[in-house]
Every structure is written in structure tokens, then in C-alpha cells.
Image (tube, grey):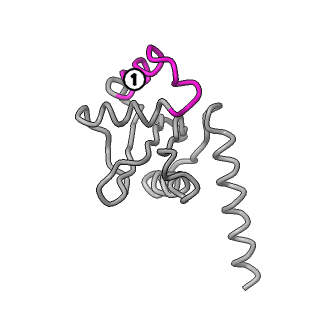
Amino acid sequence: MLIRYKKSFEKIAMGLLSFMPEERDIKKLQQTMKGYETEDDWQLYLWKDEEDIIGAIGIRVGEEVEIQHISVNPSYRQEGIGKRMIKAITEMHTDKRIVPSSSTTTFFQKFAKEEEGKEQKEDLV
């Protein structure tokens, strides 16, 4: 389930975001975290699975919802956590188009392609 970022989750959020290639530099990562804490249109959510926080998704909300960051703890990858985070954001913002940033485009395209494949299979049934 998605939970809204709070300052008390800062270390875990920074750890998760640091898995993204452009966030490996500590100064860049600190700037990103500051953006999520101070910018009104930036929102950071964490994915909690039972007891552990295992994923993070950061968005910028404007006319569209841009997925700026998406990251999953490597121990939990290939389990559909990223897809579930995107679906949860989509459900929260039904009135807006969800788009990727340049750093999340590859994952987002993979997600969209898989969703398209599921829809085609459902049409055949």
C-alpha cells in the first residue's frame, strides 16, 4: 500500500531513491529530497508491504502527473511492486494523464506494454 512520505521516513526514502542512477550522487539526492519536502507540486509516496517499506514513487502534479522517480528495493524486484505503485498513483489521479519523466520512461513503457498485453488477452476471452 502507498503511504505519504514523512520526514521520519527520510533515511529509507533516500536509500530507495539512491537506487536510481541519477540519484547516486549524495548532493543530487539531498536536493531531490528537499524538493519533495518543500515543493507543493512534488509528492513522494512509499510502498509498504506488510511491515517493510520496499519502494518509493515520486510524482509532480500539474496538468498531468509526471512520475519523476520509481524505485524498489533490489530484494523485492520482479514482484510487480513498481507496477502496483503506478496503478495506485493512477487510481489517486483519475482526472489526470500519468506520464513518465526522462528517467522513468523505460520502466513506464514496459509497464504500459504489459498492461496493453493484458487488455488484449482479456478481449480474447
Instruction: Give x and y (percent) for residue 70.
Output: 52, 41
Instruction: Give x and y (percent) for residue 107.
Output: 64, 45
The answer to whether 110 appears left or right of 74 in the picture is right
Residue name at image x 45 percent, y 17 percent: 26
Quadrant where the image shows the C terminus: bottom right
Residue name at image x 31 percent, y 39 percent: 5
- Direction front: furthest residue: 75
Instruction: Give x and y (percent) for residue 40.
Output: 36, 29
Answer whether residue 31 is magenta in the image: yes
**In which quarter of the view is residue 10 placed?**
top left
- Direction left: furthest residue: 8
The answer to whether 85 appears left or right of 112 in the picture is left
Residue stretch in magenta:
19-36
**Relative to 76, residue 29 above or below:** above
What's the amino acid at mark 1? Answer: Gly
**Relative to 29, residue 9 above or below:** below
Assign a secondary structure to mark 1. helix
Question: Badge 1: few (under 14), some or many (20 or more) residues near its Cα, within 10 Å?
Answer: some
